[in-house]
Amino acid sequence: MTPVLETPRLILRPLELADADQAQALFPQWEIVRYLLNAVPWPYPPDGAYKFYRDVALPAVERGDEWYWMIRLKSSPEQLIGAISLTRGEKDNRGFWLDPKWQGRGLMSEACFVVTDYWFDILKFPVLRAPKAIANTASRRISEKQGMRVIAVEDRDYVSGRLPSEIWEITAEEWRRNKNTASSRTR
């Protein structure tokens, strides 16, 4: 069971199929999808969020392979502003998106902090890896703030095309040693 997580400004609620309508209204924006893996169809279909949640995300949650949260402001808890997820696996454990009008305010850093803490302290995984396009400087800054480091460089296929990418990593030991510093960087 995926729990509700909170930060000073956010509520992260577990994904529900009922979230699809709000996600569908926000998600199909080039600023959101351009650095997502090309498994995301583009142009985004009118029922894309519903089908993804029903056929992919929620079954993965049921299997215990993935954890999804819908990001909401505490000041407006009914309004969806983004999503963040964790995935069991070797190379790609965390992904997220945020409505562009809410970007640049440190909100995703807050969400990443609490989700990374959950990954290590509750799920007890030994390492977290997050690949990203090198051109995605905002996402790279979040990884830097968390004390992650680049362990590999490779080309990956994104919605916007084939791009040079980095695999960022942090171990549970590094996270526990540096999480107070990472927490202060999210503010």
Image (tube, helix red, strand yellow):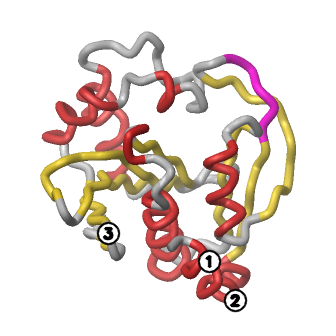
Report which residue position mark 1 lands on.
182
Give the x, y percent position of residue 120: 55, 76
Could you say whether the residue bearing mark 1 is in a helix, strand or loop?
Answer: helix
Q: Label 1 near label 2: C-beta < 8 Å? A: no
Give the x, y percent position of residue 50: 24, 28
- Residue at horizontal 20%, vertical 35%? 22
Image height of 116 relative to 62, above or below: below
What type is the residue that disc 3 sits on? Answer: Arg
Report which residue position mark 3 lands on.
9
Q: Earlier in the sequence, mark 2 or mark 3?
A: 3
Q: Quadrant of the N terminus?
A: bottom left
Report which residue position mark 2 lands on.
177
Q: Magenta part of the protein: which range?
A: 161-165
Could you say whether the residue bearing mark 3 is in a helix, strand or loop?
Answer: loop
Distance, label 2 to label 3, CA atoms, is: 24 Å
- Tell which tag, 2 or 3, sits nearer the viewer: 3
Q: Residues within 10 Å of mark 1 (few under 14, many from 20)?
A: many
Question: Along the line of sight, which residue is nearer the eye, 60 or 11?
Answer: 11
- Residue at horizontal 67%, vertical 60%? 143
Distance, label 2 to label 1, CA atoms, is: 10 Å
What type is the residue that disc 1 sits on? Answer: Ala
- Tell which tag, 2 or 1, sits nearer the viewer: 1
- Residue at horizontal 50%, vertical 73%? 187
